[in-house]
Amino acid sequence: MSSAYFGSRLRKGAVNTTVAALAVAALAASQAPDVTADSAGRQTTTDAPAADPATADGATGNSPYYTDLPPLNSPNPAPSASTGTKPAGTGSSEAGIPATVLDAYKKAEAKLAQSKPGCNLPWQLLAAIGKVESGQARGGRVSADGTTLAPILGPVLNGVGFANISDTDNGAYDNDSTYDRAVGPMQFIPSTWEWAGRDGNGDGRKDPNNIYDAALAAGHYLCRYSWDMSTSAGLRSAILSYNNSTDYYNTVISWLEYYRKNSHEIPDGTGSVPSNRSDGDSGTTPRTPATPEAPHKPGKPAEPDKPAEPDKPAEPDKPAEPDKPGTPVEPGTPPATPEPPATPTDTVHHLEDAGTAPLTAMAGDAFTARIGTRTETAAGKAVAKVRVRFTISGDTDATFAGGESVATVVTDGKGVASAPALRAGEKTGAFTVRATVVGRTVTALTYRATVTERAADTLTRAATTDLTCEVGGEFAEEIELRATYGGAAADNVAATATLITSAEEPTTNDKGPYFKDADGNPVRTWTLSTDADGLLKLPELYADDTAGTYLLRVTTAGGATLTLDLTVTAPEPTTPTPEPTTPTPDPGESQDPADPSPEPSAS
């Protein structure tokens, strides 16, 4: 079955639904793991998690996407390098990915494998999203550095058929200072690009129109909540967070499995471009900057079946005012396009704290409290479905879950936006989190957070043996302590070991046991920290020539303290061995030992 066949058949309505259902059913049976289909051929999703509630507008603002599906047959093999010709047949054409675009996907996969290995992001997922978002940068129309030859812009998100997202970038990315538009080959809306943007080609810029930057940003976006792409649940959550649509998910999965079967590199600019979009556009006109007659500008005639307030006639003494009093209307001039109805964002007057507890965490730990912000009208009524942006600022390395410093959350039915959990870095001190309304100027709400140093509340020594040493010697046992906080191992906690004079006056002693510095000189204060298991291993201790009992006090950050007794003994006294003595001989005795006879006396 050729792609031309699919291109001619995929249209909005029953035909499109039928073909898509058949394609998804076939993929479910032959390719996609953990995918099932119902009796109509539709993919079922009851066993998968819902889309990320914190990003209801997704990376793209839920902009339109290309709905063309891949051929049901697996792609044909790539052409040989010797011929350099394009592969024949629709299957091969659909499997071809422009060289620069393919390189960007693979480089992004490699970088994510290092920075977020648990995500298991396959480059084929980026290729599948790139296919449905922009047709692989419109067939690979990119420069050598990966920048699109012409901007790729989605429709104006003015609430007419699409989401209503007021301008957030002053037109810097999308050339529209009134409303936002999705930008670039991966179709990021400006407010998402602000925090998700990455420099993928190392040129020092974060450009949504560059496929290297956009592909790396898309990878980080998909992996931001540690979803595992090797599982069906993680894959589904990530894709739906990009565009919150089950049809979108089904389309991306179809291309993902297609590219997994086979794909090959083709020259830039020679890729096929999809023909159908989810908004009913034929796809023949590139998504480029708006023409002078943009959809949101005046010029569209009013609908004839909506006269102004026919069921509420004006009072006789107070005639209804025209839309533009005093302005004559030229004959034949079409009426101005009516303003879109007020959105929830338009009704927000101020922000209120939604019961946020004090924000304090130890370095390296997650904050137990989460920020909650409520959007309210001037009358104090909660407003749902409003996008609130939380931004971390200050000299800190604290982040939201997923490693980002900016998060956008949609308010729930009670008008509350709950920010993702904060995680402290290693920098201690205070920082702030600002809550603002996306698309509306409302006074920001500022939250103060504090990161304290790592701490322990208990120190223990497992060994029970006495710590003794003779003067001038070395303590045989190496001292090892365990630090805990709340019963759990306290890792990377700073500690100080000091030889003190007494428990009551813990000044540093100038005699007795000591440590040695790098030059071998005696020191009686030593700083160190616990290891990953909360263990604290002190260096060797030596004794000088003064016997006695001494105190070693170890103190950690957080106030854990343990004092140990050290005993230095004098050498055992030794008993001198007596010298042997030679007895003095008696004068009357023979001096010859061999002659036992006494010497005769003189007569």
Image (cartoon, rainbow, N blue to C red):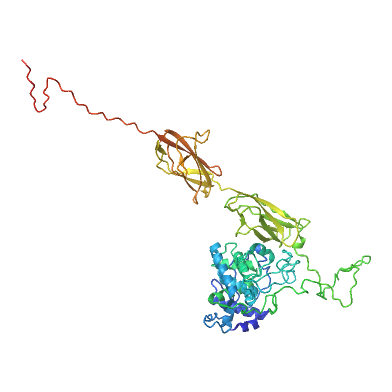
| Picture layout, residue 228 above or below residue 505 | below
**Which residue is found at the position 88% from the left and 69% from the top?**
322
Q: Is residue 355 visible?
A: no
Locate the C terminus and report the quarter of the image it occupies.
top left
User: Up-down: is 437 above or below 487?
Assistant: below
273 or 44, nearer to the observer: 273
**Is 309 in front, or is 466?**
466
Between residue 527 and residue 222, name the one nearer to us. Answer: 527
Identify the residue at the far front of this view.
602
Q: Quadrant of the N terminus?
A: bottom right
Question: In the displayed structure, does residue 250 sit left or right of residue 282?
Answer: left
Where residue 146 appears, x then y in whole percent?
Answer: 62, 71
Residue 406 in picture, x, y percent from top left: 65, 59
Residue 439 figure quarter: bottom right
Residue 589, placed above or below residue 53 = above
- Indicate left or right for 518 with 239 as reference: left
Percent coordinates x, y for residue 163 in the rendering: 72, 68
Which residue ends up furthest to the top in the rendered image? Answer: 603
